[in-house]
Amino acid sequence: MNTSKPTQTPTPQTLHFESRISVEQVEEGYDLAPKFDRDGLITCVTTDAATGEVLMVGYMNPEALERTILSGEAHYWSRSRQVLWHKGASSGLVQKVIEIRIDDDQDAVWLRVSLSAGIHSAPASCHVGYRSCFYRTVALQSGKIGYAETEKTFDPKLVYGDAPNPTLL
């Protein structure tokens, strides 16, 4: 009688992105061969998996993409701070990845996520306090700014304290 426990396949600790060999491989093959730009980044559009609402557009370097794939939680590269960041690590506003898609030429990523509520807030994504980073509208013809979201979801001072604002002028 065999009493040994079944072995489980360990979760990989690293991920290998394939070299880009042909148009066919990139566009219709099964190899993940992302095309990072000259700064080593790939654009990432993040939407709410339940509603389809665009929450943010960010950037990933290879490590951020790898960590996102392996952990199931969104990681990005902050161009302003020049650091890798795990979305929600300081705010609690974690983005749990439901699905990852890559576009036809593999130079953009789309994350469909569910949002976690933060310590002091309802589920949200924007560091300014709104649910989405796309909380403003731009009127056609005049270019005037309006607000699609009229109230903040949380108070950024309560969530981030004295942390520096990542927006650069």
Image: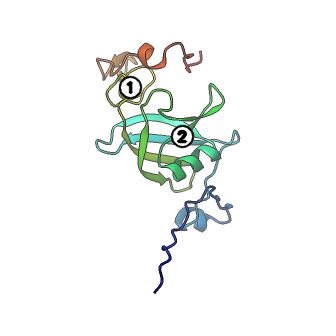
Residue 151: quarter of image: top left
Residue with the mark numbered 1: 119
Q: How far is mark 1 from mark 2, CA to CA?
A: 19 Å
Q: Are marks 1 and 2 in contact (CB under 8 Å)?
A: no
Looking at the picture, does residue 168 appear above or below residue 48? Answer: above
Give SS at disc 1: loop
- Identify whether 2 is placed above or below 35: below
Q: Which mark is residue 75?
A: 2
Q: Residue at x 42, y 15 (%)?
A: 158
The secondary structure type at the circle numbered 2 is strand
Residue 76 position in % (x across, y down): 56, 38
In this figure, what is the number of numbered marks?
2
x and y percent of residue 142 in the render?
Answer: 37, 17
Q: Residue at x 38, y 37 (%)?
A: 54
Q: Earlier in the sequence, mark 1 or mark 2?
A: 2
Image height check: is 133 above or below 25? above
Give the image quarter of residue 166: top right
Left or right of residue 21: residue 146: left
Q: Crowding at label 2, few (<14), some or many (≥20) Cα neighbours within 10 Å?
A: many
For the residue marked with disc 1, what is the amino acid?
A: Ile
Q: Residue at x 52, y 66 (%)?
A: 28
Residue in the image at 61% along x and 64% along y: 23
Q: Nearer the viewer, residue 142 or 63?
A: 63
Which amino acid lies under the numbered mark 2 shown in the image of this protein?
His
Q: Quadrant of the N terminus?
A: bottom left
Residue 104 x/y as whole percent:
51, 56
Name above or below for residue 78 compared with residue 40: above
- Which is nearer the eye, 150 or 163? 163
Callout 1 crowding tier (Cα within 10 Å): few <14, some 14–19, many ≥20: some
